[in-house]
Amino acid sequence: MSEESAKNACNAFIDILQKIKCVTYKEVGRPDKKNRKTPDVDFILAPKSENEQSPKIAVEHTIVEAHEEQIAYVRQLDGIEKEIGQRCKGKLPIDYCFNLIAPPSLIVGMNKKNRDQFVEEMSGWMPDVAKSLTTDQESSRLYNGHEVSLWCIGSCSDLNGTVGMMSTRPENAKKEGRDRFRRAMEEKLPKLITYKEKGFSTALLLEDVSFSHSNPGVNLKDLIPHQYHSEFQSKIDYVVIFVSQKNKMIVGLVWKEESQLYSEIPDNRRFGRSSFQQ
C-alpha cells in the first residue's frame, strides 16, 4: 500500500465528513506505525473543536485491484510507454494516435533486459504497421507467445502522431476482482470491529484503482464474508469507495453511512476531485 495514497484518501475522507456531518476532523494518530506485534488501523481522527462531542473515528485504508499485481502492471506500462514514445517520435502517422495493447502476463515481472528487448522490437514494428491502420482498426502479432496489438484510436488532436500503452485485464478478471475485494474485507474488518467495541466510530476507505467498483450498488454487499455480515452492518459506520489515479483521489462515493447502506449512491454522497484538498 502506498503511504501517499493512504494519506490522500484519509484527507479526502476528512473533506467528505465536513460536508456530510458539518464537523471538521483532524488526524490525531497512526496506530499501525507503532511497533506492535499485531496490525492496527491506519489513522485515528478526532474533531478539531474541543466542544464537539462526536466520537473519534478509526480509519482503515486499502487498495482494491482488479486483478493480481495490477499496480505493478500499470507502473511497468508507464515506463514502457515513455521509452516507446521517445523511440517512435516522428515515425508515426501524424493524423492519428495509437495504443499498444499488451497483457499483464507479458508485462508483469519484466526485468530490465526483457523490457529493453520488448521496447526495441515494438519500436521497430509499429511505425510500418501504423501506416496501414485507420480509425478503430488494429493489427496484432505474437511476442514471446503473447498477443500484442497496435490499435489506431483515431484523430486525437494534440495526441496525434503518438503511441500510448493500454492496459488489459486477464480473462478471469471479474472473478479476480471479486476475490480481491473479499480478501480486503477479511483483512480490514476485524481491526475496525475491535475499535468499534472500544467506543470509536469506524471507517473503511476502499481505493479502487481499477474503476471496477465505481457503481457499488447492492452487488458488493454479496462479497462481504459471511461471518462478518451482521457486524459489517452494525459496527462499520462509513465505507467510502475512492476512484484514484496515481495516488490522487478523483471520485469519492459514500457507500455506507451509519445504518444506511446505499443500493444506489445518491448525488449528495458523490464527491469529485474538486472537493478534496490533495
Image (cartoon, grey):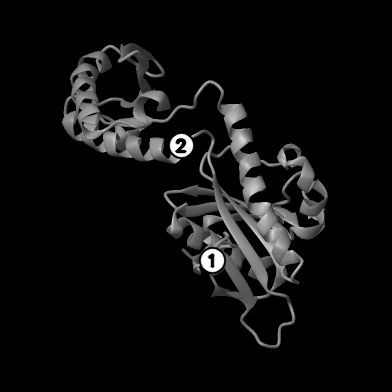
Residue reaching furthest to the bottom? 51
Q: Quadrant of residue 100?
A: top left
Q: How many marks?
A: 2
Give the residue at x 53% y 69%. Answer: 30
Asked whether residue 135 appears in the rendered view, the answer is yes
Instruction: Examine the rendered structure and indicate whether residue 188 appears above or below residue 211.
Output: below
As rendered, which of 253 and 190 lies closer to the eye?
190
Instruction: Examine the rendered structure and indicate whether residue 109 appears above or below residue 44.
Output: above
Q: Which residue is mark 1?
A: 36
**Disc 1 marks which amino acid?**
Arg
In percent of width and height, residue 93 lies at 23, 22
In percent of width and height, residue 12 lies at 55, 62
Mark-to-mark CA distance, 2 and 1:
30 Å
Q: Which residue is mark 2?
A: 70
Give the residue at x 54% y 66%. Answer: 36
| Mark 2 closeness class: few <14, some 14–19, many ≥20 residues within 10 Å | some
| Secondary structure beneath label 1 | loop
In the image, taking residue 57 as reference, residue 142 lies left or right, namely left
